[in-house]
Image: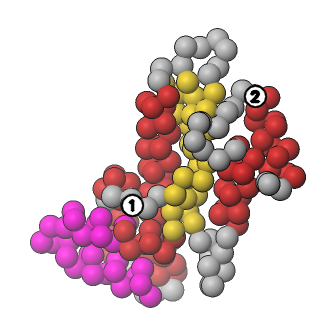
């Protein structure tokens, strides 16, 4: 049985027309699981999951699901990119990198974002609900995905390695060093 606040939120969403797809957990339980994952921390006090909630709108349920899932994966890839860029910025502040090196690294990371989003494996779906708006012939799907933050950094590095050219090998070595420190 879901916690009271999740049941209350599920009722509110049900009034707005949202329903859990057949075969999924009840909406209240999905909400509770999603909230727990959002606040779960690793041993160092960092979020355990990178979370994203996105919506998709299409004429069929499967197309709307695919749109929402792809949007969520792209958002997660963007969050991974942001985290790596934050590491790069902190190294600039600590005078461990020059501004020019940081720009090169940031550019390389941002060009790898699409590859990162397509190579995300083991993405966990914490919530999936849908509704059919009254005045529309389309279906709206909302999904909440989570991705292990530690695995995310490793997968991002793997994805970036796939895009390497001979000049990029040195850049990748620098990024490897920054992320694993």
Residue 181, placed above or below residue 98: below
- Considering the numbered disc 1 on the image, is that residue within a helix, a strand or a loop? loop
Q: Is residue 16 magenta?
A: no
Figure quadrant of the N terminus? bottom right
> Circle 2 sits on which residue?
16
Would residue 110 be visible to someone looking at this image?
A: no
Figure quadrant of the C terminus? bottom left
- Residue in the picture at 59% in, 36% down: 21
Looking at the image, residue 4 sits to the left or right of residue 91; the answer is right
Looking at the image, residue 90 sits to the left or right of residue 41; the answer is left
Query: From which residue to which does the magenta span run?
Result: 156-181
- Residue in the picture at 67% in, 33% down: 19
Q: Are marks 1 and 2 in contact (CB under 8 Å)?
A: no
Looking at the image, residue 121 sits to the left or right of residue 148; the answer is left
> Circle 1 sits on which residue?
121
Secondary structure mostly taken by the magenta-highlighted segment of the chain:
helix
Residue 57's tag is: none
Instruction: State which quadrant residue 154 falls in.
Output: bottom left
Image position, residue 146 (x, y; %): 55, 59
The residue most toward the left is 166
- Residue in the picture at 29% in, 66% down: 160
Q: Nearer the viewer, residue 117 or 32?
A: 32
Residue 7, placed above or below residue 176: above
Q: Nearer the viewer, residue 126 or 24?
A: 24
Mark closer to the chain start, 1 or 2: 2
């Amino acid at each position: 049985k879901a916690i009271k606040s999740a049941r209350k939120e599920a009722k509110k969403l049900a009034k707005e027309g949202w329903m859990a797809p057949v075969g999924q957990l009840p909406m209240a339980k999905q909400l509770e699981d999603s909230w727990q994952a959002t606040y779960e921390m690793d041993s160092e006090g960092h979020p355990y999951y990178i979370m994203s909630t996105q919506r998709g709108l299409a004429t069929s349920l499967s197309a709307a699901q695919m749109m929402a899932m792809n949007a969520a994966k792209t958002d997660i890839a963007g969050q991974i990119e942001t985290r790596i860029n934050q590491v790069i910025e902190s190294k600039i502040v600590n005078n461990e990198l020059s501004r020019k090196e940081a720009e090169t690294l940031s550019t390389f990371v941002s060009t790898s974002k699409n590859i990162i989003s397509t190579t995300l494996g083991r993405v966990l779906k914490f919530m999936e609900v849908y509704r059919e708006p009254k005045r529309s012939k389309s279906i709206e799907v909302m999904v909440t995905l989570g991705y292990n933050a530690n695995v995310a950094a490793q997968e991002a590095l793997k994805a970036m390695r796939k895009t390497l050219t001979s000049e990029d090998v040195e850049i990748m070595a620098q990024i490897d060093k920054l992320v694993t420190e």
